[in-house]
Amino acid sequence: RCVKLFVFYTRIFFVIIMGIGSKNKHKFLISIMMILIYGPLIRGATTLAGLHVAWQSHLSGIICGVTMALMIIRKKRKL
């Protein structure tokens, strides 16, 4: 279960950051919509998630998704 949530958080935040870093208006708007829809997920990556929630895997997913997106954005801008 933790692995599935890790992958879910990674994908969601990867898409959000890629959309924000994109010069395409449609991708940017989609990422803003995803923030509005999935924004409350950030609570699951903190200690506010509850006593029996493995928030560390959620936070790791966010960090990985954001890191991968930033690496790709930087690589594209260098080209």
Image (cartoon, rainbow, N blue to C red):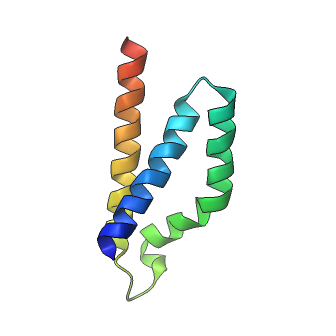
Q: Residue at x 42, y 27 (%)?
A: 73
Residue 64: % across, % down: 33, 50
Residue 55: % across, % down: 37, 73
Q: Residue at x 39, y 88 (%)?
A: 51
Quadrant housing the C terminus: top left
Specify whether 67 is left or right of 14: left
Given residues 65 and 46, the one toward you in this image is 65
Q: How many marks?
A: 0
Residue 4: % across, % down: 36, 68
Q: Residue at x 52, y 70 (%)?
A: 43
Q: Residue furthest bottom?
A: 52
Q: Quadrant of residue 25?
A: top right
Q: Quadrant of residue 16?
A: top right
Quadrant housing the N terminus: bottom left
Q: Is residue 30 above or below residue 75?
A: below
Given residues 46 and 54, the one toward you in this image is 54
Specify whether 29 is left or right of 41: right
Q: Residue at x 45, y 45 (%)?
A: 14
Residue 62: % across, % down: 40, 55
Q: Is residue 75 above or below residue 61?
A: above
Specify whether 46 is left or right of 54: right
Q: Residue furthest top?
A: 79
